Amino acid sequence: MIKKGSFLIYSTGLVQGLTLVAFPAASRIFTSPENFDLSSTSYGALFIPQALLSIAAAWMSSKLSGKARLSSLFSIGLLANLFSMLLFAASFFAIAHREAAYVILLVATACLGLGFGLTVPALNTYVALLFPKKVDQAVLLLNALLGIGTACAPLFIALFIGLGMWWGLPLFLTLLLLGLVLSTFISSSLPAEKHIEQNSVGHQMSLPWPFWLFALFALFYGIIETINGNWSTVYMTTQMGANVSMTSFALTIFWSMTTLGRIFFAMMARIIPEKMVYRILPLIVGCAFILLAFLESGSDAMALLAFGLAGLGCSALLPLTLSFCSKAMARRKGAATAGLIAFYLVGYGIAAFGAGPLQDIGGITLRKIFGLCTIIALLLAALARVIMKKKEIKT
């Protein structure tokens, strides 16, 4: 029997994944002279409002969880996502006035950050309410659907670009989000909230020092994931000279392998020790960065292999970090989880914007930037070993 609200919650997870990657998937549109003609710095700066609003919204969500209805925060998040995609589609009509178009895009990414920061915590809470005896499996399914959405967004944008109407993707997502918003208001299909337990203890207690190891790990992870997620299409265009289909395929492969890896390692947890996975995955990412740093122009197939390898390397790192941190700080789980997500988003912001000025001002190619990220991957590997050795960390 399908529980009330489960279809809406899981559908929202899929659409949220599509929405989250809509902007990076359209990087070719943003940087092409025929459209927005953004520099690398301007393209990277698009994601600053998204990162800042995501952090603010996640913090606000945790603070308001005991005062506002979860359904209200969820609905506001959906509306913010809807306005984001609506503005993204509307920016097409302002291309002739590029300054105005850029402002519209900045507001759109800000709305996306707000929507993501409010919606995703609510989704995780709702699946826990729906399946209290199978929380791990329910959260895994939710994250798998989010991952499927992130993997499909580049394919959709390639399809719409091929049809000569790139704005079709944000318009399509606007319609999907409108349907979800109407479902929350008309059918009252969200799960009941009467059993939600508010845990304010974590907000009143200081976090112990091991938390900062996890926080630093989350920040570094945010950088390496975002370098791949936001800059892979630009890399394929500028360094490989690839066409639209190939650039979109690279991003699809990265997110597909990230999603499949998370599912695989979750299913194989009893066979492959999580400690070993945690130590090895950063090294896999490092190998991918080394490969991307030395590829010659036109090596599309090898670049796709490298992004697939990077996706596999990234796959379980964030879920395991959240899991290990929660086990280590059970009494402060709420505050610790919120803190880790905040640090992850800081890493996202650093990578999403930072790669732009490094290219435009520093004259460093994306090939070299990917190579430099090998250092961050090695730092992650070192941190993973330190975290696993601490007596305070129970895995």
Image (cartoon, helix red, strand yellow):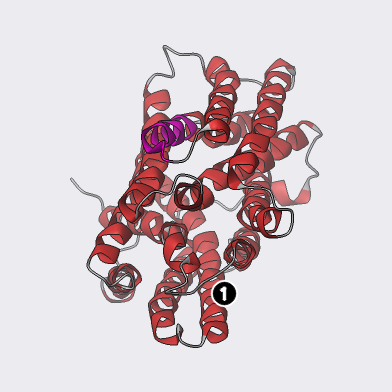
**Dot 1, crowdedness within 10 Å: few (<14), some or many (≥20)?**
many
Q: Residue at x 39, y 43 (%)?
A: 250
Q: Residue at x 58, y 17 (%)?
A: 275
Q: Residue furthest top?
A: 271
In the foreground, 266 or 281: 281
Q: Is residue 90 above or below residue 68?
A: below
Query: In what quadrant of the picture does the N terminus appear?
Result: top left
Q: Residue furthest front?
A: 297
Apparent side of residue 208 relative to residue 160 in the rendered image (left or right): right
Residue 297 x, y percent position in the rendering: 47, 40
Apparent side of residue 19 relative to residue 179 in the rendered image (left or right): right
SS at circle 1: helix
Q: Is residue 236 magenta?
A: no
In the foreground, 59 or 176: 176
Determine if residue 170 is in view: yes
Determine if residue 146 is in view: no
In the foreground, 82 or 160: 160
Which residue bears the numbered disc 1? Answer: 106
Query: In what quadrant of the picture does the C terminus appear?
Result: top right
Image mark count = 1
Residue 97 x, y percent position in the rendering: 51, 88
In the foreground, 64 or 229: 229
Residue 394 x, y percent position in the rendering: 65, 20
Residue 51: which quarter of the image?
bottom right
Q: Is residue 299 magenta?
A: yes
Prevalent SS, magenta region = helix
Kind of residue at disc 1 = Leu
Q: Is residue 155 above or below residue 164?
A: above
Residue 44 x, y percent position in the rendering: 60, 61
Q: Point out the stretch of residues depicted in magenta.
A: 298-312
